């Protein structure tokens, strides 16, 4: 299934969009750190019959700009709110993975009236990862930048061969889009990791629309802990939690069908 591409000027940066479908509610997909919009392609193809899908490259990722303004989590959230405004129409559903889930939650907390529903795929809501000290974040950002620069020195073919070996059960679409995203990412976007987080405990109660939280198994690499998931359900207003068994951090790549069913059910209940 084909998609259309275009650029939109959002808050002084050009964001690259991939759009599929022309009917149904708007579904915006926010990728994780070092991914890009087309990393959602397999899921988008399945959701198009019931939604108009927009996948976008976050600042410094894919084919979007690396603007001179700050690379922070807050800027990513404000970009998403501005993107929703630029697309117009009825409030959309937003689905985010990892950093994109953090972005989606922050955006929905900033502007709750602009969102119809939110789907969070394994947000990094884990005390061990949620470094609140500048020095910890700085050290991790430096490590991430070194990895980004190393990836950019390799060809897409080399990167794809690596992920095929590392994640042999992924669909071939996932191998290719993962590799292409790593080759395109701007090293300066690693500064996002050094930026402060808004504690999710303060964001979740401010989200007024329905929320679907998807989590996996921590021993396979999933980030959201059972304790955090239980707290999200407790403090959130309208939160549904679905655990995807035998999935690590990339839930939809590891266990595509269960994730698809959960998302389709949620969209059927809240997507229009």
Image: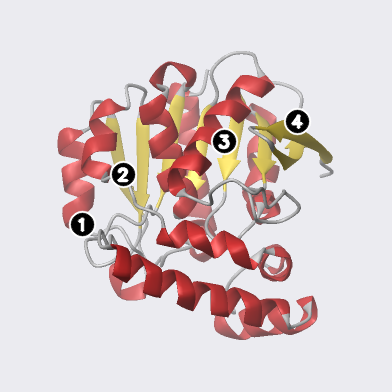
Q: In this rendered view, identify the residue nearer to me: 35 or 164.
A: 35
Cβ–Cβ below 8 Å for labels 2 and 4? Answer: no
Name the residue that disc number 2 marks.
198
Determine whether the residue tagged by mark 2 lies in a helix, strand or loop: loop
Report how far apart the C-alphas of labels 2 and 4 lie in the structure. Answer: 34 Å
Q: Residue shown at 35%/43% (left/top)?
A: 213
Name the residue that disc number 1 marks.
226
- Spot occupied by residue 73 in the image (x, y as percentages of width and height): 45, 47
- Spot occupied by residue 129 in the image (x, y as percentages of width and height): 30, 65
Report how far apart the C-alphas of labels 1 and 4 lie in the structure. Answer: 36 Å
Say few, some or many: other residues with alpha carbon within 10 Å of mark 3 (under 14 / 14 to 19 / 20 or more).
many
Name the residue that disc number 4 marks.
21
Q: Disc 3 or disc 1, which is closer to the eye?
A: 3
Say few, some or many: other residues with alpha carbon within 10 Å of mark 4 (under 14 / 14 to 19 / 20 or more).
many
Left or right side of 97 for 88: right
Name the residue that disc number 3 marks.
79
Q: Residue shown at 68%/52% (left/top)?
A: 66
Report how far apart the C-alphas of labels 3 and 2 lie in the structure. Answer: 16 Å
The first of marks 2 and 4 along the sequence is 4
Q: Residue shown at 28%/27% (left/top)?
A: 206
The first of marks 2 and 1 along the sequence is 2
Q: In this rendered view, identify the residue nearer to me: 80 or 176.
A: 80
> Where is 165 relative to 219, above or below?
below
Report how far apart the C-alphas of labels 3 and 1 lie in the structure. Answer: 30 Å
Determine whether the residue tagged by mark 4 lies in a helix, strand or loop: loop
């Amino acid at each position: 299934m084909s998609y259309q591409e275009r650029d939109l000027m959002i808050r002084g940066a050009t964001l690259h969009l991939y759009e599929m479908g022309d009917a149904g509610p708007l579904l915006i997909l926010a990728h994780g750190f070092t991914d890009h919009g087309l990393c959602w392609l397999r899921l988008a193809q399945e959701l198009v019959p019931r939604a108009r899908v927009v996948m976008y490259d976050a600042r410094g990722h894919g084919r979007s700009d690396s603007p001179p303004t700050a690379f922070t989590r807050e800027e990513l959230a404000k970009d998403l709110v501005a993107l929703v405004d630029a697309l117009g129409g009825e409030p959309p559903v937003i689905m985010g993975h990892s950093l994109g889930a953090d972005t989606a939650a922050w955006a929905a907390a900033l502007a709750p009236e602009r969102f119809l529903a939110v789907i969070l795929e394994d947000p990094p809501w884990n005390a061990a990862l949620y470094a609140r000290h500048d020095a910890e974040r700085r050290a991790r950002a430096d490590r991430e930048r070194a990895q980004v620069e190393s990836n950019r020195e390799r060809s897409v073919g080399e990167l794809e061969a690596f992920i095929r070996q590392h994640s042999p059960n992924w669909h071939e679409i996932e191998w290719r889009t993962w590799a292409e995203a790593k080759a395109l990412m701007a090293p300066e976007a690693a500064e996002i990791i050094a930026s402060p987080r808004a504690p999710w405990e303060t964001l979740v109660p401010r989200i007024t629309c329905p929320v679907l939280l998807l989590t996996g198994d921590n021993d396979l690499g999933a980030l959201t802990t059972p304790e955090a998931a239980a707290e999200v359900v407790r403090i959130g207003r309208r939160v549904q939690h679905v655990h995807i068994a035998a999935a690590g951090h990339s839930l939809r790549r590891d266990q595509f069908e269960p994730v698809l069913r959960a998302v389709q059910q949620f969209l059927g209940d809240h997507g229009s």
